[in-house]
Image: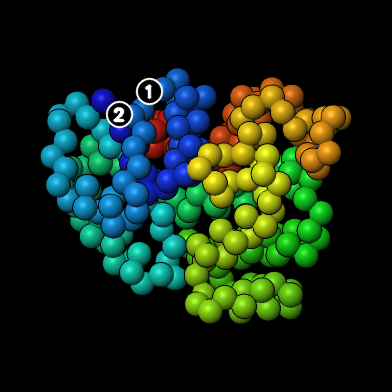
Amino acid sequence: MYYLWTEDAGAGLHFWKLVNQLFFDNALIVQSMGSNQGILDAVSHLIPHPEDIYYIAFDLVSDNQDIRNKYRLLRALADRHKNQIILLDIVCFEYLILSFKKLISWTGTRKADKIKMREEVLAAIENHSINLSKIKDKKTLQYIEGFKRFSTERIMKSLTLELTENEKWSVGGLHMGECWYMDCCVSGHSSNVRCGKPELKDGNERMRLLIKSEAIQKVLKPIIDR
């Protein structure tokens, strides 16, 4: 059996289930461990069957000391079962959405300041964290300084939620917003909701295009290569 364990719940877990359904033809068993500690605890008790492979989506942001410590422990545990416990290379779920090239055109967001901040932040990602020395835009620096405690993941999550505030595109609830994966919210839609201009009318095709983005394909590479 092939398993994918994630710390994500809500929309993040729904995302992984859609990846499994639309890209891997339901070949994986997708399970949420609820948190990074939940993943660490689960892996620490894991004795995999010889035919089982576990892919672990553990969010790694290198500016968080607690997460770095947990990741080192997780790496040591995974090394006990090489080729059966595979750690995926992921920053966080929100980064996968934020880095999608069609995010702005599809959602139709008009938040010019946040769009600029997104560009600045994405260009400054280096070794799983935001390199502040690469950010030159004053408003972006002020936005980041507005957080009581600097964290790449918190900033990614905040920006992503700002840019997907339309409920039809939201990634902050129990599920991915309907327009990511259903036949709705296309250009010319009769609703009053601002829907952006996704060029694909088929929801599954939109989701597949998201999954084929560079950032997500990098995460999925160990699974694809199997």
User: Are there few (<14), some (14-19), or many (20+) residues within 10 Å of tag 2?
Assistant: some
Horizontal side, residue 48 vs residue 27: left or right: left
Q: Position of residue 3 (x, y in %)?
A: 31, 33
- State the residue in front, 46 or 124: 46
**Residue drawn 83% across and 39% down?**
192
Residue bearing the label numbered 1: 27
Badge 1: few (under 14), some or many (20 or more) residues near its Cα, within 10 Å?
Answer: few
Discs 2, 1 touching: Cβ within 8 Å: yes
Spatial distance from mark 2 to mark 1, Cα to Cα?
7 Å
> Is 135 left or right of 222, judged from the image as shown?
right
Q: Amino acid at mark 2?
A: Tyr
Q: Quadrant of residue 214?
A: top right
Task: Locate the N terminus and report the quarter of the image it occupies.
Answer: top left
Q: Is residue 153 above or below residue 142?
A: above
Q: Residue at x 69, y 24 (%)?
A: 183
Q: Amino acid at mark 1?
A: Ala
> How far across and how far down the image is residue 136, in percent?
71, 75
Q: Residue 155's spot in the image, x, y percent? A: 57, 65
Mark 2 lies on residue = 2
Q: Nearer the viewer, residue 64 or 38?
A: 38
Q: Quadrant of the C terminus?
A: top left
Query: Is residue 27 placed above or below 219 in the rendered structure?
Result: above
Residue 8: image location, x then y, percent = 42, 47
Of callouts 2 and 1, the N-terminal one: 2
Mark 1 secondary-structure assignment: loop
The answer to whether residue 184 is visible is: yes
Q: Residue at x 21, y 42 (%)?
A: 82
- Secondary structure beneath dot 2 equals strand
Tell whether 123 sits left or right of 3: right
| Residue found at x 36% / y 33% | 30
